[in-house]
Each structure stands twice: as C-alpha cells, then as structure tokens.
Amino acid sequence: MSFTSPFPDVEIPNLSVYDFLFGSISDADLDRVALVDPKTGDETTYRRLIGQIDAAAGALAARG
C-alpha cells in the first residue's frame, strides 16, 4: 500500500549540507553567535564553528 502526502513536493538543492548551511554566509555574519552552551553560557561564532568543522574534516581526510 502506498501513501501520498497532502503537502507539495519539497525542492532538494543539489548542494552538500556544508555548502547549504555556510555557502552564502556573509563576512558580517561570521562573527555572529551560532551556538550557545546552555550549561556554561559559552558562545561559538559562525567563524569558529566553520573553522572547527573544517579542522575535523581535514583530520578525517588525513586519516583516509
């Protein structure tokens, strides 16, 4: 038995998740807060978050 959604189809862009999330971020937005640690209140900016993601991806790539 198949089902159909009452909602219209969703457009899925031909981008990686990384490019979808950060590809169009402006320089002005890089220093905005992206994440807040609720326990400590520590804030992470988009610039730092992107740097951490790039570092983790680079480390994984280096490991093969």
Image (spheres, grey):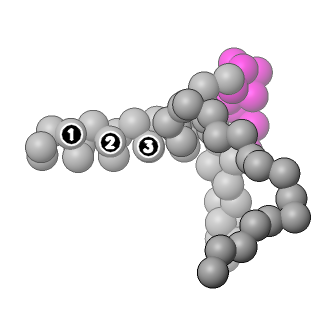
Residue 55: percent from the left, percent from the top? Answer: 34, 39
Residue that label 1 marks: 61
Q: Which residues are magenta?
A: 25-33
In the image, what residue occupies the spot 54% across and 31% down? Answer: 15
- Would you name the residue on which mark 3 appears? 53
Residue type, mark 1 in image: Ala
Name the residue at the right extreme. Answer: 6
Q: Is 22 inside the magenta-drawn segment?
A: no
Q: Residues within 10 Å of mark 3 (few under 14, many from 20)?
A: few
Mark 2 neighbour density, 10 Å: few (under 14) some (14–19) many (20 or more): few
Amino acid type at circle 3 is Ile
Q: What element does badge 1 sit on?
A: helix
Residue 4, given in percent of the width and then of the height, sits at 75, 67
Q: Residue furthest top?
A: 27
Disc 1 crowd rating (10 Å Cα; few below 14, some 14-19, many 20+) is: few
| Residue 52 shown left or right of residue 28 in the figure | left
Q: CA distance from mark 3 to mark 1?
A: 12 Å
> Residue at position x 69%, y 26% from top?
25
Would you name the residue on which mark 2 appears? 57
Q: Are marks 3 and 2 in contact (CB under 8 Å)?
A: yes
Mark 1 to mark 2: distance in Å?
Answer: 6 Å
In the figure, 24 relative to 37: above or below? above
Horizontal side of residue 7 vs 17, given as left or right: right
The quadrant of the image that shows the C terminus is top left
